[in-house]
Image: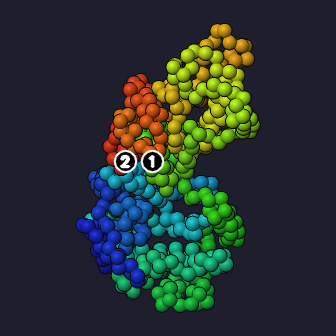
Amino acid sequence: MAAEHPDAPPVATAVRGPGRSSAVPTVPLRLVEELCSRLRDTGVSYCHWKSTDMLHLSASGVNDLDLLVDRRHLPAFLGVLAACGFKQARPRRGRQVPGVVHYYGLDARTGTLVHVDAQAQLVLGDDTTKSVRLPIEQAYLASCTQGPLFPVPAPVFELAVLVVRLALKHATWDAAAFGLAPLRPAERRELQYLSARVDDEVLRRVVEVHLPWIGWGDWSRYHRALLDGAPLRACLPAGRAVVRGVGDLMRRRPAVDTALRCGRRVEWGVRHYVLGQRNTKRLVAGGSVVAVVGGDGAGKSTLTNGLAGWLGGAFDTRVVHMGKPPRGPANLVVKGALTAARRAGLLPGWLPNYPTPAEHRGRFPGHAWLLWQLVTATDRRRQHRRVRSLAGRGVLVVCDRFPVDQVTRMDGPRTRWVPTEGVPALARRLVRAEQRAYAAIAPPDLLVVLRVDPDTAVARKLGVDPAEFVRPRSAEVFAADWHATGAVVLDAARPADDVLAQARSAVWANL
């Protein structure tokens, strides 16, 4: 009965279905192969329960791994995930579904984050509520056969459940009102793929035995309407009959579920289209602060953006610039006034932010210069509070630059050299206030140091920044002793892709 399901063709295959003839890479990820091997060796009863026409995309990390797991084997299943380095994540409020867990793992060779969407129960429905549980998990799993990678259900079982899924997603009045009634091309392709692989009599017996709440008549009527491409005026009534059939299996009363779907569609639409928020998850282990430091020309911004782009597809991730934080009101007023005074020639002998001994010669820099540094420190401390607040709420924060003791020429205290004797009391208070602001900044959860030799840094910044500016800042990071900091030190002279790959592995190991 069950046709063979091609999990992972060796290199590439033409995607089946209307308008999908282009070749798609189908090499399984090593992480997916390891996961399937361990699950098989452990004897876990599970299957890839849907979209078996596109298993090669799941195996290659393009699609999620949608796994149904025998709840009696769930502890062993979770143990295998942990052994493979997977980490649990939770959806945002309103998207958590009972009986469903989410895990992510890193395929080190490709840098792909693999998403395991594991269900101990067959929970179906629109993405906003997922309200129906079909209590047929044991029969569903019993129908499975082992494919090259995943166990897969018999096509008759998968098709029987698919039609119910489509009714719950597309045949409700609110789906029609929001313009969601038509099937997507991938859903129509999956329907055609499975329908071509079943025997009608066997299919009828499966529906009558395992979906008695719906019955063969209503189920087959909706199936035929979908398969024939019937207009919505024919599909919607047939689909509503299927939805009514599973009404007693809903977590909520149908009217409550409908109201909740409508409210969440509006809420999530505002979040996505107005606020620009993505449907991302947060790690159960909590948020984390990852800081990238290095001299000029080391590739800090490139790596920061690379890490954020990699993590941001799955997790709630923010990029924060600790070196150049947004200016607060005090900064705007003080620096605006001082800048005007400098341009008017009222503040002669103004020192750089990080003066060399030859530049400052141990002399008092003036109250105006100290006040300038204090408002800068205050802004960085406020930015640090924001970073810690985000991480405390479960967000992954990637910081471009960060104040650390080893780097004195970029983001740390600027008044360390100022003498404490023989200067006015106000000056001493300004110095102490600036240094207290930096002392309040806690170290990041993970420090990534980009180390590049000064000559390479100067060459990278040629025509952008003068060598006399770049060289000392790069040399300080290059010569610093990072062993006692627990930092991950990377050779930033290597190609950017290699540096990003090393950083991904280090970040994932520390989340």
> 130 or 84, which lies in front?
84
Disc number for residue 352 = none
Identify residue for label 1. Answer: 302
- Going from N to C along the chain, the mark reached first, 2 or 1, is 1
Q: Amino acid at mark 2?
A: Ala
- Relative image position of residue 419 (x, y in whole percent): 61, 13
> Mark 2 and 1 residues: CB-CB less than 8 Å, in contact?
yes
Q: Secondary structure at mark 2?
A: helix
Which of 448/471 is in front? 471
Question: Element under label 1?
Answer: helix
In percent of the image, x 57 and y 43: which residue is there?
320
Viewer-proximal residue among 448 and 460: 460
Residue bearing the label numbered 2: 496
Where residue 450 sits in the image (x, y, percent)?
A: 41, 37
Residue 506 visible in image: no
Answer with left or right where residue 261 lies relative to residue 360.
right
Tell me where residue 312 appears, x and y as whole percent.
51, 53
- For the residues labelled 2 and 1, the Cα–Cα distance comes to 8 Å
Dot 1, how many residues are within 10 Å of its Cα: few (below 14), some (14-19), or many (20+)? Answer: few
- Name the residue: 44% across, 45% down: 463
- Quadrant location of residue 139? bottom left
Image quadrant occupied by the N terminus? bottom left
Q: Residues within 10 Å of mark 2 (few under 14, many from 20)?
A: some
Q: Nearer the viewer, residue 13 or 134?
A: 13
Residue 344 is left or right of residue 467, and the answer is: right
Q: Which amino acid, mark 1?
A: Thr
The structure residue drawn at horizontal position 45% and vertical position 76%, both measured from the top left corner, is 186
